[in-house]
Image (cartoon, coloured by chain):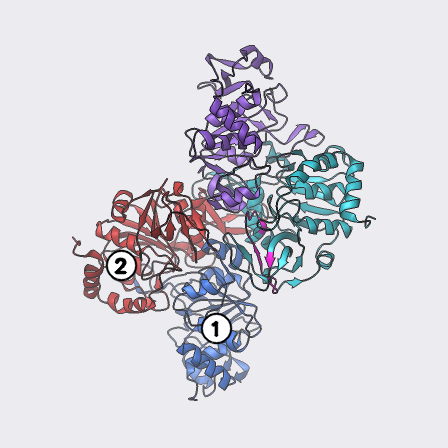
Chain colours: A red, B cyan, C purple, D blue
Amino acid sequence: MAEIVPLRDAVAGLVHDGDSVALEGFTHLIPFAAGHEILRRGRRDLELIRMTPDLLYDQMIGMGAARRLVFSYGGNPGVGSLHRFRDAIENGWPHPIEIEEHSHAGMANRYTAGAADLPFAVMRGYAGTDLVEHTRVRPIACPFTGEELMAVPALRPDVAIVHAQEADHDGNVQLWGIPGVQKEAVLAASRSLVTVERVVDELEPRPGGVVMPGWVIDAVSEAPGGSQPSYSLGITRRDNDFYREWDAISRDRDRFGAWMDEHVMNGVRA
Amino acid sequence: MAEIVPLRDAVAGLVHDGDSVALEGFTHLIPFAAGHEILRRGRRDLELIRMTPDLLYDQMIGMGAARRLVFSYGGNPGVGSLHRFRDAIENGWPHPIEIEEHSHAGMANRYTAGAADLPFAVMRGYAGTDLVEHTRVRPIACPFTGEELMAVPALRPDVAIVHAQEADHDGNVQLWGIPGVQKEAVLAASRSLVTVERVVDELEPRPGGVVMPGWVIDAVSEAPGGSQPSYSLGITRRDNDFYREWDAISRDRDRFGAWMDEHVMNGVRA
Amino acid sequence: MSPADSGEVQTVVAARRLREARSVFIGVGRPSTAAILCRMVHNPELVLVYESGTIGAKPHRIPLSIGDGELAETADAVVSVPEMFNYWIGPGRIEVAFLGAAQIDRHANLNSTVIGDYDNPKTRLPGAGGAPEIAASCGEVVVVAPHSPRTFVEKLDFVTTVGHGSTAVITDLGVLEPDADSRELTLVQTHEGVSIDQVKEATGWDLAVADEVAVTEPPTDGELSALRELVSR
Amino acid sequence: MSPADSGEVQTVVAARRLREARSVFIGVGRPSTAAILCRMVHNPELVLVYESGTIGAKPHRIPLSIGDGELAETADAVVSVPEMFNYWIGPGRIEVAFLGAAQIDRHANLNSTVIGDYDNPKTRLPGAGGAPEIAASCGEVVVVAPHSPRTFVEKLDFVTTVGHGSTAVITDLGVLEPDADSRELTLVQTHEGVSIDQVKEATGWDLAVADEVAVTEPPTDGELSALRELVSR
């Protein structure tokens, strides 16, 4: 059963240096508060897993928390580049990072295999692309038809962290709106943390509601506004202006650092 | 876009002699009205696909409509045997039928593969059981770990028929409550029919609602009460008494025939 | 209160088995009754999972089918059948599985497919359902079955479900558990008033008997009245 | 009304492409604008599908991201990302896909991964996203890209997405379609005021030109005012 604990304690207990960590949320419900707490705790050498690194991983990479990045689309949606992501890959700043990249379909299927505790998933894809020689996929033949398809290896993060609208006091969680791969990420991971906008006495079933029982979650932490500048449908709005502003903030290493110090690290930076 | 047509016309147009037909609904939302219409239209030589044949396939088998049965659990839930199913397999009455049986997990994965237009799905299962030599599965090795798993072939019915609570005038469908494998069956099939309790002006999003857009459905037919004696959550209740009564009705060939004539065939029987 | 009959004892013993469990996978019939009883008297937090897709169902009455409306309406979450098997059962998220069977052998292999020859069956049974993957994935399997030589057989007519290493069998006569060394199902407990010989006679193989055979603590008044109240709802 | 600029022409031409379509898969930016415009002026029944999981979204404003709240709130159905790729995109249920790319070659292979060497990139691009499987599965692919020799290249630095047999490319200069025999992208249409030579100069390979090159019918007042109204929302 999930324990409801302060975010600081949840991150301290669940995320260790060197862990593979998946902070998921597809455009919607991105767990910014938890990612920032990981930075404030000074976690290092992380394998960061996420389909769409987005601003959150741009920040975590730029702060030097990532040893390795596993992803499928590293852009600022509708705006352009993730400059810290680019700077790390193009210039090795603040230090070089390893990358493993897939297509969205590949990553999604890797999570489903992880959630199902299977070692791989089967799909059509990758064939003919240069991705094949730069990532981990293997051809596999259908034993009935002989058709050659592609196998992708399961994702099994050490920790999954997602954000949801609500939890009850037993740590049962409900999210609604675009569900992304959050359920799969939580079920695929060895440990899990869900940050929520609010803790309520009882979860009211919602249209589109995805419920995760508290007994598949390790910790739940209240983090109102914790998905901003992304959003929590029905509670907060996506801060599209900030997504645009991030382009300028992140383009310059010093400006980025100053922004992070002021808005995220609050003087905690080592 | 789904056409909204009378059930009689939908069945006449979509279900042909010799078709493979999946009438799905896991305990909940079993499409009895559509199955009965298939019997009244006199369709023959069907390959009937269904995880849980239930009373509906007991009736269709007993009436001689099935050439072949693909299933995973052929019982009257909580009551006992399906006597027409047993009589067909044990005694070849009214004529012998072929069977292909799987586990629930196998059937569910076969539908997911069909819905995804993949030729097979991978799972752990079947190994060590006598099912292996009596059904269609093949071992498959994980190309990353070497672990041997099992492949099950995709299900691709000619026609899928499911029941839902509501459709709108464009044939968009919503069901809620236990969702079973209905979405997978519809997406896996070449043609599809959804019977609904009611047609409404606008679908109101519901907790647990599964929406299928009208453009993946061929026909929608109004059939109020069309899942009885199973049920449509929020509209009708499961007729547990009838499930118990069916044991006696179906035990005897003549009594079965008389009951079907009176309650289903309405004198249409050839 | 009239004394417990052997079926009631079986149900009460099965319910006790779930005292410490977090979650249990159940089919209909006696297993379902036992699990609901356990929630009533021992373990109100016990998570009931039915293969229809209802996780954390809280039925007030004994359901006839695994998909009765009350299960969906009271569940913490309701998922599709593919999700139930792929995300919940397969990865072993459910601690205990309660299963039935028409035949069981000394290694806890189960037959729920056919009596007689597969192609010319004497009795065609319902088939596998969820049992094979449920038994393979759950941490502990509890088979609830009536004790007779027809059910407890030397050799199964069909292996539907491969025996799970930690299977316990709760019957109307007693309890069998796998021996630590031989892994063979062994009599470890008899219900009150049942002799070891009676159990051996009701078993179609030469049943091993533990050095110490416990006697079932009879149903308490609380257990029995709760069970009877539940059945009468 | 001021005359249409080349970007507006490109958007209007892309919108027209969807006049008869049932469903279109779109990313953000110009493709999204074109698809919303098409719903406004040509094809109100057009089903917009975004890879975030929104099927049948009806945005009133141009979304910044593919997961803006308005998309979820107006969609006919919202599904998980695995379901989107496995049940909807993979089986080819979406008729047309609108894609962008940093580089495209004469066989409509696309690069959205890297400029320069993979291990020592000059410019690291966002990567594949949904493009490879979307291009492989949709019945028709429409690439919307600015026409320049940097984008229309002889050889891609990285093949992210394999060219689809029925790809059309809509640029700010004209329209390329695969030749029926050679399958090579060929100039079939130029926008008003654009010369064939101008298009050839903006293409990094020796661009084939169709025997008959159509001239784009200029945006109507209705198209242009709808587009400008949409952009201003």
Left or right: residue D40 compared with residue A93: right
Quadrant where the C terminus of chain D lies? bottom left
Measured Cα–Cα span from mark 1 to mark 2: 33 Å
Q: Residues within 10 Å of mark 1 (few under 14, many from 20)?
A: many
For label 2, the SS is: helix
Label 2 packing within 10 angstroms: few (<14), some (14-19), many (20+): many
What amino acid type should be assigned to the residue bearing mark 2?
Gln
Q: In the drawing, what numbered circle is on residue D129?
A: none
Helix, strand or loop: magenta stretch? loop
Q: Answer whether residue B167 is magenta in the image.
A: yes
Q: Is residue A242 left or right of residue B252?
A: left
Image spot of residue C221 (x, y percent): 48, 22
Residue D14 left/right relative to A239: right
Host chain of mark 2: A
Q: Which residue is mark 2?
A: A59
Task: Look at label 1 and name its amino acid.
Answer: Ile
The quadrant where residue B49 appears: top right
Rendered location of residue B19, percent (x, y): 71, 51
Boundaries of the magenta span: B166-182
Q: Which quadrant, please, contains the N terminus of chain D? A: bottom left
Tell me if I can see residue C102 in this picture. yes
Of A13 and D219, which appears nearest the observer? A13
Q: Secondary structure at mark 1?
A: helix
Q: Where A115 falls versus B192 (above or below)? A: above
Same subunit: marks 1 and 2: no
Please say if C74 is above or below D21: above
Image point 48% across, 25% down: which residue?
C223
Which residue is nearer to you in this view: B69 or C219? C219
Residue D36 - label: 1
